[in-house]
Amino acid sequence: AAAPPPIAEARAAAEATPLAAAGLRVCQYDDGAAEVQGVEKVPSEGCTAPSATAVGRDFMTGGLPRQAVQDISADFLGGYVFGNACGLGGGQDERLMVYFPEVAAMTFFLSQDGQYPQLRQPAWILGARKMFIGLDGSARFNSPLVLDQDVPLVSDLVEVELGGVPVNVSGSMPFVAFESANQAYFGHEDYFKLQAARRNKHPAQREVGSGQFSFEKQVLAWYGSMALTSYHKDVRPALKGLVSSVGTGPWLAGLWWGDSQVGMLAVWIGQALASPTWGDAFNLDYYIYSDFTENPGNQCFVHSAANCAACLEHCRSRELPKTAYWMPGYATIEGGPCAKSASDCGENGIEDVVRSHGNSTAMELWNSAEKVMREGTVDSTVFDLLLR
């Protein structure tokens, strides 16, 4: 991918870009909350609840045609699997490497990292297939590995143009990987920092200005990674032929311990800027979990008060098995993986922010978000500060 656009260019584009350009759709994937009203829903092919014993449909299982799965990577794509982890350890990125063995092989043989076999991000990988079943956003059912006996090998081929030449490529699960710009933003992690961060109560989560981990850098990370113009002109027809939406979970708020509300706002603004570069409609499919494999329970805070409390209780009452997540011991709360305290919930949720800002430009929300994060305190949620 090309380097991200200059921040001044992104801000200028945001002035004239409506947030509606993001094509925001929401899936509440077994989050334990009442249905969010006033926000378009992900179609049922890509959003069905899991059963007590098996996955449903989300962006990591696949099912919605032409929906890309977004891998929350680190500085490099590939996690820390080869020569480090054994089995299904780590976060979402490491687990996806196991379920997409073709992606894992590419990261190994085309490695660009000096320490681990990994690829630079952002990166699109087209044609790779998910060879196993059992992995959704929670990773609750990801062990043991079960080979997908029905994985398509021919029926999913789509003819696209690559460098001016027609080629057949699997269209079953386009794969895009990139990181949020907040890896290691706490410096040395410890109990007190992570306990605050998991409750969206650490001031570093709301950095504004032009610093390395500031909100504008999060917007730019999503925009630069998802803009079609970031990629070589020879691959753009193939991307357009295979992808019409991107599915994501709590980007920024996984194992980098960001604020889930801040992450949602950065994704929404960034996607609004990126979507017009594709020419056609390009939807942002935002999946909400009570128990995402990284930082379980934290994404509940994007809900309004009652839904947030219900979501947290759902996480607590159906605690993930230890095979489904990884976190340092000092990040656990009362010995478990879930964020738990309903007192940390705000009054306003994603539906309230969409209702109040959905007709605004990307720049209007960008300015408002930076203003409240600069002037407010962590005693109030970012959504509540926005809607005062």
Image (spheres, grey):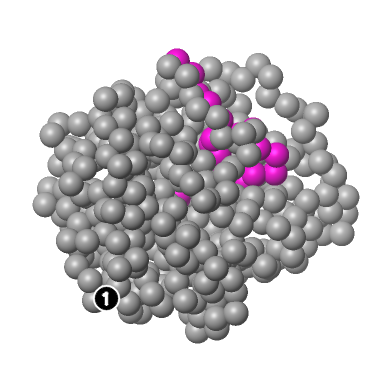
Nearer to the camera, 196 or 23: 23
Query: Relative to 83, is 285 on the left or the right?
Result: right
Query: Relative to 44, is 79 on the left or the right?
Result: left
Residue 230 drawn above or below residue 142: below
Nearer to the camera, 66 or 157: 66
Task: Determine the residue positioned at 22% across, 61% down.
Answer: 380
User: Which of the 4 image quarters holds residue 338?
Assistant: top left
Callout 1 environment at 10 Å: few (<14), some (14 to 19), or many (20+)? some
Q: Name the spot of residue 38 as percent of width and height, x first.
A: 52, 51
Nearer to the camera, 269 or 5: 269
Task: Determine the residue positioned at 57% across, 44% down.
Answer: 41
Q: How many marks?
A: 1
Q: Name the spot of residue 65 as percent of width and height, x first.
A: 70, 39
Does the stretch in magenta take in 55? yes
User: Which of the 4 image quarters holds residue 21?
Assistant: bottom right
Q: Name the spot of residue 354 as percent of width and height, x first.
A: 47, 59
Residue 374 drawn above or below residue 200: below
Query: Relative to 351, is 380 on the left or the right?
Result: left
Looking at the image, can residue 24 be seen? yes
Secondary element at image label 1? helix
Looking at the image, can residue 108 be seen? no
Q: Amino acid at mark 1?
A: Arg
Query: Relative to 42, is 161 on the left or the right?
Result: right
Q: Main secondary structure of the magenta part?
A: loop
Q: Name the spot of residue 266 as percent of width and height, x first.
A: 44, 63
Image quarter hosting the N terminus: bottom right
Q: Which residues are magenta?
A: 53-74
Task: Determine the residue positioned at 77% across, 41% down.
Answer: 169
Task: Determine the residue positioned at 26% across, 25% down.
Answer: 317
Q: What residue does disc 1 label?
A: 374
Image quarter hosting the C terminus: bottom left
